[in-house]
Image (spheres, helix red, strand yellow):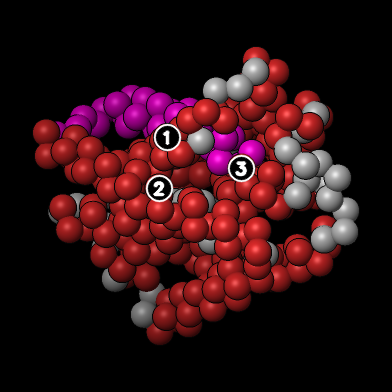
């Protein structure tokens, strides 16, 4: 991986992390076109730079992030399913990180779900803010988050839809999803770095610099993306993201049919 590739992947991460379109999926597809998707460092990079994007939440929601102990306990409960399933399915997830076809299929299926989600949950919103989310609801949202272990399934999309299925309004569900991303991505980054070193691999000075550059760029880009997304989502809903996912997913499948991405 060179610096240009790192910067491009970081920009994609920053833009897509909080959109229901799968940031990991977009980075897998992009790195496949670059011919570096199967590289161990690329797999590490695509996970670690998500931390930079996630930290933008802490900055933007600084006052709201530091809330009551009860709020943190709910985040912890929502975080638990990802910890357990992430450890159990680590090897399977790692293999899927090389599969652009898995990403494409997930994008299409998720797209059709997003086309309908506003209709499904439009009239059932009864939870106005994060303080009103119960522990059981937090746990259920945590299980929805686990679906995003499949590349191409959006973590933010899965948790927001999970929240809406529990009668939480779009804005509140999106914000809880953002807060939940902080412990989730800290955990994912720590686990990925541990596995990387346990596998006998080490980071060179240049690779460390690439990770730093990637995190900084993802952080800056995500700052702008979050505010834009919340505003757009509150007014317009998910349909445009559904159409986008379907179009991108089908395009990838067509391209792969004629020019297999694993060979690019």
Label 3 vs label 1: CA separation? 13 Å
State which region is magenta. Answer: 176-204
Horizontal and vertical percent position of residue 15: 41, 57
Where disc 3 sits, the SS reads helix
First of labels 2, 1 by sequence position: 1
**Residue at point 19%, 35% (across, down):** 208
* Residue 260 in which image quadrant: bottom left
Horizontal and vertical percent position of residue 11: 32, 56
Horizontal and vertical percent position of residue 103: 51, 62
Where disc 1 sits, the SS reads helix
Of residues 217 and 195, the one nearer the viewer is: 217
Q: Which mark is residue 59?
A: 1
Q: Which mark is residue 41?
A: none
Principal secondary structure, stretch drawn in magenta: helix
Dots 2 and 1: beta carbons under 8 Å?
yes
* Residue 111 in which image quadrant: bottom right
As displayed, is residue 103 above or below residue 128?
Answer: below
Residue at the spot of label 3? 175
Q: Is there any visible trace of residue 125 in the rendered image? A: yes
First of labels 3, 1 by sequence position: 1
Report crowding for label 3: few under 14, some 14 to 19, many 20 or more residues within 10 A (C-alpha): many
Report crowding for label 1: few under 14, some 14 to 19, many 20 or more residues within 10 A (C-alpha): few
Where disc 2 sits, the SS reads helix
First of labels 2, 3 by sequence position: 3
Residue at the spot of label 2? 223
Question: Which residue is at the far top?
Answer: 69
């Amino acid at each position: 991986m060179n610096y240009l590739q790192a910067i491009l992947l970081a920009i994609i991460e920053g833009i897509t992390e909080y959109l229901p379109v799968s940031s990991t999926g977009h980075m897998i597809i992009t790195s496949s076109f670059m011919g570096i998707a199967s590289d161990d460092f690329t797999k590490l990079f695509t996970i670690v730079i998500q931390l930079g994007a996630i930290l933008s939440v802490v900055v933007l929601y600084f006052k709201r992030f530091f809330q009551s102990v009860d709020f943190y306990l709910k985040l912890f409960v929502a975080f638990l399913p990802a910890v357990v399933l992430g450890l159990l399915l680590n090897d399977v997830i790692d293999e899927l990180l090389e599969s652009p076809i898995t990403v494409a299929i997930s994008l299409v299926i998720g797209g059709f779900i997003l086309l309908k989600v506003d209709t499904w949950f439009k009239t059932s919103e009864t939870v106005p803010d994060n303080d009103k989310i119960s522990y059981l609801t937090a746990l259920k949202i945590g299980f929805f988050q686990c679906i995003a272990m499949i590349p191409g399934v959006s973590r933010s999309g899965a948790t927001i839809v999970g929240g809406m299925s529990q009668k939480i309004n779009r804005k509140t569900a999106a914000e809880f999803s953002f807060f939940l991303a902080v412990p989730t991505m800290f955990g994912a980054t720590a686990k990925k770095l541990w596995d990387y070193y346990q596998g006998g691999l080490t980071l060179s000075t240049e690779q460390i610099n690439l990770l730093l550059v990637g995190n900084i760029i993802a952080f800056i880009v995500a700052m702008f993306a979050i505010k834009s997304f919340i505003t757009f989502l509150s007014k317009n809903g998910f349909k445009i993201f559904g159409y986008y996912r379907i179009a991108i997913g089908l395009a990838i499948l067509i391209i792969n049919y004629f020019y297999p991405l694993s060979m690019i």
